[in-house]
Amino acid sequence: MFIGEYQHNLDQKGRLAIPVKFRNQLAKGAVVTRGLDNCLFLYTKEEWQKLATKLAALPISKANTRAFSRLMLAGAMDVRLDSQGRIILPDYLRKYATVKKKVIIAGLYNRLEIWDDLVWQKYKTGTEKSSTDIAEALGELDV
């Protein structure tokens, strides 16, 4: 399970250190892809396979399902931890998420999200201001 918020720096070669507590879960490889809200999603191979299977089963006759599948699948890249626990973020994904130097890695149970620090701070501030409304909406879903 991935939880917590961590700040790391991206080096000049596009390498990002993964928090030590998550490295064992990602040791067999991982997949990084375009996420939502201008971040990147990082999945274990096992979790990625579950998601990819669901995406492949979506009806291709619907424009929204085609678009979402393209966003997630075409943007995906296999990554491996190096000996120092880093992954390389491809340039096209760094551009997509506007990731520069300071990076936030947020644990969201079955995935990690990778955010540019400034984008994360802006997103988090907005979400915190709306937390009561969000909680009420989720309450209707029995969450």
Image: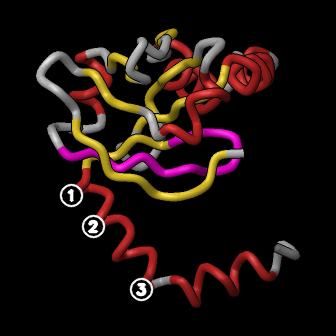
Q: Residues within 10 Å of mark 1 (few under 14, many from 20)?
A: some
Residue 26, visible in the rendered structure: yes
Q: CA distance from mark 3 to mark 2?
A: 11 Å
Q: CA distance from mark 1 to mark 3?
A: 17 Å
**Residue 20, percent from left and from top:** 50, 38
Instruction: Look at mark 3 in the image and give the residue it sits on.
Output: 129
Residue occupying the point 48% across, 83% down? 130
Residue occupying the point 17% across, 16% down? 13
Instruction: Look at mark 2 in the image and give the residue it sits on.
Output: 122
Q: CA distance from mark 2 to mark 1?
A: 6 Å
Query: For the magenta stretch, what is the residue range?
Result: 102-112
Question: Which residue type does callout 2 highlight?
Answer: Lys
Q: For residue 16, which quarter of the picture?
A: top left
Question: Which residue type does callout 3 highlight?
Answer: Lys
| 82 relative to 7, above or below | above
Q: Residues within 10 Å of mark 3 (few under 14, many from 20)?
A: few
Q: Secondary structure at mark 2?
A: helix
